[in-house]
């Protein structure tokens, strides 16, 4: 029988386990899933009927994840946005792995791409980053071919760029928090030098932001977005926190003083915890048990007085500036600009938190992905103030996770919601955890905890640990049929008795041993960096101030009523001045001078009032939003400059209208000097 050669039409997907090529056949949309109608059937029960799809764009394809229950992996990381495919990219759904090939690769190129992934194809299930084998990548002058995950080693040579632009860098970090060209490593004179390339979110060495090029020492730890790179003297070892956050605390303690007597009061008492990657953990307990205090300590927003919190083995408090962008906190109070439409609000947040080299299309994709994640794509053009309670909570979650953090804290995120909406929110949090994030939630409503969360932490009054375990283990420990009954059981013993009883259990020993700081990663002291160049500092301030000013103007335009009232003030004052004094040009000189002085005095007082009235509301109305954004990446100077610039513009407009109408109605000569003086008074106000 003669051999028949079948020519494959590229692009195609190569299934690594079977070496079978699946041609895309130039299809506009190529769907993969367990559905019988799928172009690429996925014979894995963990996959969804509609798992992912490839969509033709120009001469290539983009990939889009469709499943909410089974994550689609792109080059080892969870696919959350529409991603343009490059030759050699790896896609994984369940245990199935596919290599995207744009052409037949029979030479060295194929040998370069395939061996990195073929050894993984025999594994069943998705391998966790902590268990993945070490791999060494020899990075040269060419473009990067894969993203770094935990366990990679990068051999250093020559000059190497680090960033998310796959075509231009040698070390590819594919995360939205990483700039296209983020940092540069240079090997010369027997040493290794690292320099930040004016990245948006910064390059950190041993927790300190890199402000000038510095020579690395063995043991230095480099933070870029959710990636941590350890320099051992010859190469870099990667430890990605992207969808791989291990959170631990040991002996967290916090003491405050009571307002009435000033006596010390223990509100958190030696709490130790281990929260593993992709876990959804609920903090439970009666009022006064320290749930929100523990949440604040774990998120480093309100650090504990004693104890230690580690994120993948690194001290969170000591490295907070380097790690904070990978942490999102959704507060109990909903803090969003109510007059903006949902898509507008998310877009402004994305522009503030994502690198400035992120394209408009990438921004839009990030916003659309968040809207789909929280199920609000149909409400994208609705004003925040018109959303229901449950929709507003979901909007807040989307707003805080648009920059793709890996650790999410939720403080009473379901408070005030009906039972059905509470169930929907808890299922959403579980989906977020299953998608790769580590989720910690404080809640009082226990109706849906057992169905959705992996583990619960029960606190007794005074912040004392009463139990940690799965919902089923918790019911068994407290001998109740429903979790809601544990509050009554907690009253049967003192908080100290519950704590002492838990300290003797095997569950506590697991928490205690797992929370031991023995594995804490430490770094050598680095050279203290000098101050950043003034031009770089000004550039960051100007960019943020411009974005904040644009958002503020959009908010003002959306609140037409308040804007008309601001302009109406100057019109009303001008009208009263004209009515009171009339035309003074025909008066005798003494009377004209006296009336002119009175008019100028009133105009001066009014100008000061305009400035005071415009600014007074801004001092308090955005405090919660300001604090939240400052905890991520907002610069205080940029915020102040934006408010000052916009309010000055409004005050100048008010003064101009006041002078125009008053001068026309009274014939008082108001030259440029007088108008300028009144503008200065408005600014001073």
Image (cartoon, grey):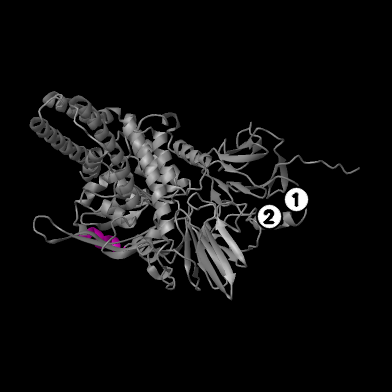
Report x, y in % for residue 20: 72, 45
* Of 62 and 361, the residue lying toward us: 361
Q: Which residue is mark 2?
A: 113
* Of 77 and 543, the residue lying toward us: 543
Residue 432 at least partly seen: yes
Q: Of callouts 2 and 1, which one flags the residue occurring earlier in the amino acid sequence? A: 1
**Residue that sits furthest to the bottom in the current view:** 190
Residue at 65% from the left image edge and 32% from the top image edge: 28
Report x, y in % for residue 203: 46, 60
Q: Is residue 41 above or below residue 312?
A: above
Mark 2 is surrounded, within 10 Å at the Cα level, by few (under 14), some (14 to 19) or many (20 or more) other residues, namely some
Q: Say whether residue 439 is magenta.
A: no
- Separation of residues labelled 2 and 1 (CA atoms): 9 Å
**Residue that sits furthest to the right in the current view:** 1
- Quarter the N terminus occupies: top right
Can you tell which quarter of the image residue 514 is in? Answer: bottom left
Left or right of residue 209: residue 484: left
Helix, strand, or loop for circle 2? helix
- Magenta segment, prevailing SS (helix, strand or loop): helix
The residue segment tinted magenta is: 496-504
Can you tell which quarter of the image residue 500 is in? Answer: bottom left
Q: Is residue 75 above or below residue 524?
A: above
Q: Which residue is mark 1?
A: 105
Residue at 66% from the left image edge and 35% from the top image edge: 39
Left or right of residue 677: residue 196: right
Report x, y in % for residue 291: 27, 52
Report x, y in % for residue 33: 60, 37
């Amino acid at each position: 029988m003669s051999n028949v050669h079948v020519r494959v039409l590229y692009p195609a997907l190569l299934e690594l386990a079977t070496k079978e090529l699946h041609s895309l056949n130039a299809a506009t949309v190529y769907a993969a899933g367990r559905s019988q109608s799928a172009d690429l059937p996925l014979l894995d029960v963990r996959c969804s009927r509609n798992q992912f799809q490839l969509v033709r764009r120009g001469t290539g394809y983009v990939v889009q994840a469709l499943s909410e229950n089974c994550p689609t992996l792109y080059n080892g990381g969870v696919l959350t946005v529409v991603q343009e495919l490059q030759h050699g990219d790896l896609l994984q759904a369940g245990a199935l792995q596919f290599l995207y090939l744009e052409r037949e690769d029979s030479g060295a190129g194929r040998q370069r791409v395939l061996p990195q992934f073929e050894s993984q194809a025999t594994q069943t299930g998705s391998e966790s980053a902590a268990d993945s084998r070490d791999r060494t990548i020899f990075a040269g002058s060419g473009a990067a071919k894969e993203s770094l995950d935990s366990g990679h080693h990068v051999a250093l040579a020559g000059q190497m760029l680090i960033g998310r632009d796959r075509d231009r860098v040698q070390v590819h970090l594919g995360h939205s928090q990483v700039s296209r060209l983020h940092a540069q490593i240079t090997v010369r004179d027997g040493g290794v030098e690292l320099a930040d390339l004016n990245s948006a979110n910064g390059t950190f060495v041993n927790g300190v932001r890199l402000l000038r090029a510095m020579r690395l020492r063995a043991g230095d730890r480099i933070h870029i977005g959710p990636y941590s790179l350890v320099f051992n003297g010859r190469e870099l070892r990667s430890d990605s926190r992207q969808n791989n956050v291990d959170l631990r605390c040991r002996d967290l303690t916090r003491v405050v003083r009571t307002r009435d007597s000033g006596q010390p009061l223990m509100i958190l008492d030696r709490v130790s915890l281990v929260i593993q990657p992709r876990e959804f953990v609920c903090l439970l307990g009666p009022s006064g048990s320290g749930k929100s205090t523990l949440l604040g300590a774990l998120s480093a927003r309100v650090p504990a007085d004693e104890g230690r919190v580690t994120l993948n083995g690194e001290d969170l408090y000591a490295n907070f500036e380097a790690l904070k962008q990978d942490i999102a906190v959704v507060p109990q109070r909903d803090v969003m600009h109510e007059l903006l439409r949902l898509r507008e609000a998310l877009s402004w947040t994305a522009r503030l938190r994502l690198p400035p080299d992120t394209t408009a299309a990438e921004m839009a994709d990030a916003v659309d992905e968040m809207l789909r994640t929280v199920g609000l794509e149909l409400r994208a053009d609705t004003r925040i103030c018109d959303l229901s309670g449950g929709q507003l909570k979901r909007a807040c979650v989307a707003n805080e996770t648009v920059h793709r953090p890996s650790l999410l804290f939720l403080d009473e995120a379901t408070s005030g919601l009906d039972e059905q909406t509470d169930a929907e929110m808890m299922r959403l949090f579980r989906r977020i955890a299953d998608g790769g994030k580590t989720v910690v939630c404080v809640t009082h409503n226990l109706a849906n905890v057992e169905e959705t969360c992996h583990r619960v932490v029960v606190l007794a009054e005074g912040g004392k640990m009463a139990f940690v375990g799965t919902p089923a283990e918790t019911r068994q420990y407290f001998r109740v049929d429903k979790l809601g009954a544990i509050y009554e059981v907690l009253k049967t013993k003192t908080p100290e008795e519950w704590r002492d009883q838990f300290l003797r259990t095997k569950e506590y020993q697991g928490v205690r041993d797992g929370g031991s700081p023995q594995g804490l990663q430490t770094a050598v002291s680095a050279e203290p960096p000098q101050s950043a160049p003034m031009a770089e500092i000004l550039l960051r301030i100007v960019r943020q101030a411009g974005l904040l000013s644009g958002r503020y103007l959009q908010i003002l335009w959306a609140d037409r009523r308040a804007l008309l009232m601001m302009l109406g003030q100057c019109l009303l004052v001008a009208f009263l001045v004209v009515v009171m004094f009339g035309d003074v040009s025909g008066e005798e000189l003494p009377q004209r001078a006296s009336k002119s002085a009175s008019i100028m005095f009133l105009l001066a007082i009014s100008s000061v009032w305009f400035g005071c009235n415009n600014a007074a509301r801004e001092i308090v109305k955005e405090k919660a939003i300001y604090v939240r954004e400052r905890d991520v990446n907002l610069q205080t100077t940029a915020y102040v400059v934006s408010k000052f610039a916009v309010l000055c513009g409004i005050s100048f407009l008010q003064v101009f209208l006041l002078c125009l109408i008053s001068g026309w109605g009274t014939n008082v000569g108001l030259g440029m000097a007088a108008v300028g003086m009144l503008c200065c008074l408005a600014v001073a106000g």
